[in-house]
Image (cartoon, helix red, strand yellow):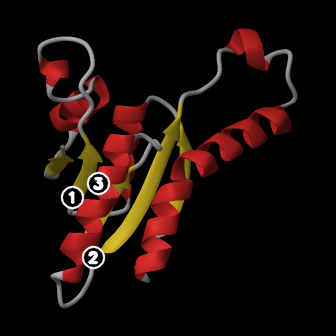
Amino acid sequence: MNTSWLIAVDGSVPSLKVIDYILTEAASRVTPPQLLLVNVQAPLSSDITRFIDEKVVADFHREAGEAALAQARQKLDAAGLAYSAHIMIGEAAPTLVEMAKDKGCNLIVMGAHGFGSVVGLFMGSVTTKVIQLSTVPVLVVK
């Protein structure tokens, strides 16, 4: 069975802890999992995009996504782990879940954020929503 993990990365400290976990976990496996690094950029409001060239908007999303993925990529490159990097545009939780489904991922791995409500004390709202929407296991690294 091919093991494929979607790793949600937003450039935050919790998402970089995910990469540290992945490095440890992958080292303990005979065959490392296929890794898909995914950053989801929120779409810009139509109030903004109607005044800006489409290419400028695409460049903005690409540059922001690359910046968010940069440290994760450096860590994986240094460890010699193969991965593919993806920058998506949309609402984070459903976009991550849909990509995991489309790519046949066995697991979604993401960091926990401590913001907001009582649930948010342990997990961020995106993490909570991914758990609710996903049909594959979600591993939250704290």
Point out the tag, 1 or 3, that comes first from the N-terminus.
3
Decide: few, some or many residues near mark 3? Use Cα within 10 Å; few <14, some 14-19, many ≥20: many
Q: Residue at x 47, y 44 (%)?
A: 11
Up-down relation of residue 6 to residue 52 (above or below)? below
Query: Disc 2 and disc 1: Cα gap in Å?
Result: 10 Å
- Identify the image quadrant of the N terminus: bottom left
Up-down relation of residue 24 to residue 59 (above or below)? below
Residue at numbered disc 1? 107
Q: In front of the other: label 2 or label 3?
A: 3
Residue at numbered disc 2? 33
Q: What amino acid type should be assigned to the residue bearing mark 1?
A: Leu
Q: Residue at x 45, y 42 (%)?
A: 10
Q: In front of the other: label 1 or label 3?
A: 3
Q: Which secondary structure lies at badge 2? A: loop
Point out the tag, 2 or 1, that comes first from the N-terminus.
2
Q: Residue at x 77, y 42 (%)?
A: 59
Decide: few, some or many residues near mark 1? Use Cα within 10 Å; few <14, some 14-19, many ≥20: some
Residue at numbered disc 3? 18
- Identify the image quadrant of the C terminus: top left
Horizontal and vertical percent position of residue 7: 34, 55
Q: Is residue 134 left or right of residue 52?
A: left
Decide: few, some or many residues near mark 2? Use Cα within 10 Å; few <14, some 14-19, many ≥20: many
Q: Give residue 3's quadrant in the image.
A: bottom left
Q: What amino acid type should be assigned to the residue bearing mark 3?
A: Val
Which disc number belongs to residue 60?
Answer: none
Q: Is residue 111 visible?
A: yes
Given contact means CB atoms under 8 Å apart, are the residues at marks 2 and 1 in contact? yes
Horizontal and vertical percent position of residue 95: 41, 39
Q: Which secondary structure lies at badge 1? A: strand
